[in-house]
Image: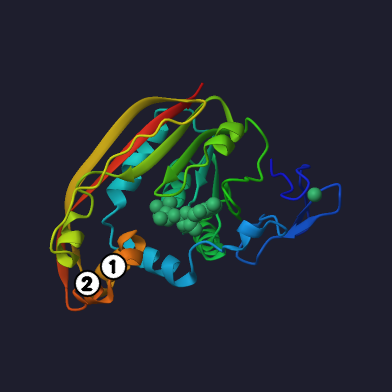
Amino acid sequence: MFLCPICKNSLTKCDNSLKCEKGHSFDFASSGYINLLNPGKMNNKKAGDSKEMIRARTKFFECGAYKSISDKLNSIVSSVDHGIIVDAGCGEGYYTHNLAKTYTESKVFGFDMSKFGCEHGAKMARRDGLNQLHYSVANIFDLPIKNDYADVIVNLFAPVANEEFLRILKPNGHLIVASAGIDHLNGLKKAIYDNIYPNEEKFLKYDGFELVNVENLKYSVEINGNDVIYSLFTMTPYFHRTSQVDKDKLSCLESISTIIEVNFAIYKKI
Ligand SMILES: C[S@@+](CC[C@H](N)C(=O)[O-])C[C@H]1O[C@@H](n2cnc3c(N)ncnc32)[C@H](O)[C@@H]1O
Ligand SMILES: [Zn+2]
């Protein structure tokens, strides 16, 4: 199912590599992921999330505060065809892994620009013997997958590649886009900013897709431990836009209560 990112011919497995008929060859890393970025494309040089960002995300996921998001995603996926699941912008693979663990009959593919994310995901997949879960370093705007292949694409807090998603989905396939709801992380924002504003909810229209449903998930959690709170902060868009003075307000914080609110927009390919 993989296509060569350079010439777009099919790739076939040959020992520890995937090769196309033109002789382009891509090796599996020892952890099990494969790098399918087109080496010649300039915007592929942006490497995706760094090792530190991936490590922070893993640290935060371990506290369990986002488990309900993962459970909700799994339940939405159960309501649509899910023989082949693609997680586009999978990060370190938290949601991808839980999908593969739940749907053992499905083939699950995680794609992310971050090799550190794919490396972490692949290690976890190997640890848990999830042989139907595959991670590839790839640009989701130029996916190395053939047309009409996937039953469902999940896309959580990552860019939406409208045209590319349309191309790789089967007819009537689904796209599930998760984004922050109005009150998401209000407790974290309160700890940092003097005035906090609700998040803007956007359910964009995507060409070739019909929005069939939006499901809202909202709950409160307590997040304990300064390192866990700071890890959560580094995962958010606020991290890059916050002054050092405001960032320092988190330095002694040991606990926060916050709302978690996520909207799942469910689109169907038309
Ligand atoms: C906010 S993170 C979300 C990751 C994961 N879905 C999660 O919720 O934990 C966004 C991810 O999108 C990835 N990303 C951004 N642009 C990308 C692109 N063009 N192709 C592939 N991955 C991309 C980043 O490397 C990062 O891991
Ligand atoms: Zn090729």
Please give left or right for residue 116 compared with residue 257 in the image: right
Q: Is mark 2 on a helix, strand or loop?
A: helix
Q: Can residue 94 be seen in this view?
A: no
Q: Is mark 1 on a helix, strand or loop?
A: loop
What label does residue 194 carry, if any? none
Name the residue carrying label 2.
246
How many C-alpha atoms fall within 10 Å of the one at disc 2: few (<14), some, or many (≥20)? few
Counting from the top left corner in percent of width and height, residue 103 is at 47, 40
Counting from the top left corner in percent of width and height, residue 58 is at 39, 64
Task: Please tell me which residue lies in front, 191 or 119.
Answer: 191
Counting from the top left corner in percent of width and height, residue 238 is at 30, 61
Counting from the top left corner in percent of width and height, residue 117 is at 50, 61
Please give left or right for residue 204 compared with residue 224 in the image: right
Task: Please tell me which residue lies in front, 227 or 132.
Answer: 227
Contact, mark 1 vs mark 2 (Cβ under 8 Å): yes
Name the residue carrying label 1.
242
Q: Which colour scheme is used?
A: rainbow
Q: Which residue is drawn at 32% across and 68% down?
A: 231
In the picture, the quarter occupied by the N terminus is top right
Amino acid at pointer 2: Asp
Task: Choose top left, top right, bottom left or bottom right for residue 234.
Answer: bottom left
